[in-house]
Image: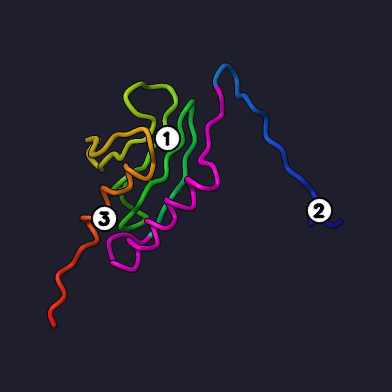
Amino acid sequence: MSYAGSIITFPATFGNSRVVFFNQKELGQILNTYGRMVSAGLVKDYAINESRGRVAFSFFQRASERPTYTVVKDTRKRGGSFLIVGADGRIFKRGNTLKAVLRFFDSKMIRLIKA
């Protein structure tokens, strides 16, 4: 039996809440940032988690630890639908656009190079 042409569909709602995912552009931006962080040696693993009204992309230094940073798309809260949360639960950046929120990581990847 071949599944090459099969289409798997998911329901638009789960219980009483909407299912939220990153769209292709958002996921591309996050994976680009993840790739740059891997090449800088800051992270080594990631995970994607979905729960009621929010989806999270977590960056790990080691797979056995808590995530160092988590990028969250949350449709339930006001004041910005994207946030960056640290390992201790502190919110480092909040905003309405993912591009603006991901700029937080730019300062983390700057390193002094001796000539």
Residue type highlighted by circle 2: Gly
Residue type highlighted by circle 1: Lys
Which of disc 2 and disc 1 is earlier in sequence? 2
**Foreground residue among 103 and 64:** 103
Is residue 70 shown left or right of residue 11?
left
Q: Secondary structure at mark 2?
A: loop
Which of disc 3 and disc 2 is earlier in sequence? 2
Residue with the most extreme top position: 16
Residue type highlighted by circle 3: Asp
Residue tagged 2: 5
Q: Secondary structure at mark 3?
A: helix
Q: Horizontal and vertical percent for residue 85?
A: 29, 39
For marks 3 and 1, give the one nearer the viewer. Answer: 3
Identity of the residue drawn at 56% across and 24% down:
18
The alpha-carbon separation of the residues under discs 2 and 3 comes to: 40 Å
Query: Which quarter of the figure has residue 13?
Result: top right
Residue tagged 3: 106
Q: Horizontal and vertical percent for residue 71?
A: 36, 42
Magenta range is 18-44
Q: Horizontal and vertical percent for residue 83?
A: 33, 36
Identity of the residue drawn at 54% across and 42% down:
23
